[in-house]
Image: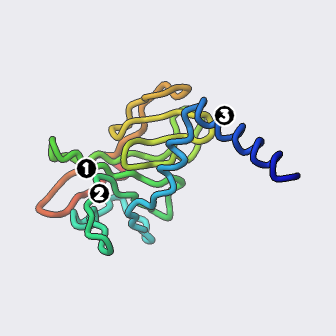
Amino acid sequence: MNRRSFLKQSCFSCANLVALGALPALLEGCIALPTINFQQAKNILEIDKQQFVNPKTKVKSNVLLLRPTWMNYDILLVHNEQEKTYTALYMKCSHEDYRLTPTENGIFCSAHGSAFDLQGNVKKSPALQALKTFPTQIINDTIYVQLKS
């Protein structure tokens, strides 16, 4: 393929991503979110509030990715500063069980283009149901995410 054909094909691909509304999600997905890995299976995850602050940059995030190795999907822990609450969202698309891409501004499914807000509500179909949530509780400076009832 020559340079002209490559550029033409690349521009066509980007135009399709823009038309589908997927390009912003892909670009935001390139930014690494703070992540905590959990190795040992537990029914309750304990997260220190300080985990929302990036230790390198000292920048506070409103989202934190929880990665329990015994679960099929990650959990996105979202801090709503105005309401002083935390929401734990299961990163499995409610449309067809695909892995979701979380960002600081929303959650996206690259498989079919569904989009969700940071409370798990559907912003863009084909998904019709909100994301699964887990109960959270705050005691002192620790957030508890209950995985099983």
Q: Is residue 67 above or below residue 63?
A: below
Q: In the image, residue 121 lies at what x, y percent?
A: 38, 31
53 over 25 or under it: above or below? below
Task: Indicate left or right for 113 with 76 as reference.
Answer: right
Q: Secondary structure at mark 1?
A: strand
Label of residue 131 in the image: none
Q: Earlier in the sequence, mark 2 or mark 1?
A: 2
Look at mark 3 in the image and give the residue it sits on.
16
Pick the residue in front: 83 or 9.
9
Image quadrant where residue 105 sits: top left
Determine contact: label 3, label 2, CB under 8 Å. Answer: no
| Residue under pointer 2 | 61
Separation of marks 1 and 3 at Cα, in angstroms: 33 Å
Q: Amino acid at mark 2?
A: Ser
Q: Where does the image place residue 59, in percent across and percent down from the top left?
A: 27, 64
Left or right: 56 with respect to 41?
left
Residue under numbered circle 1: 79
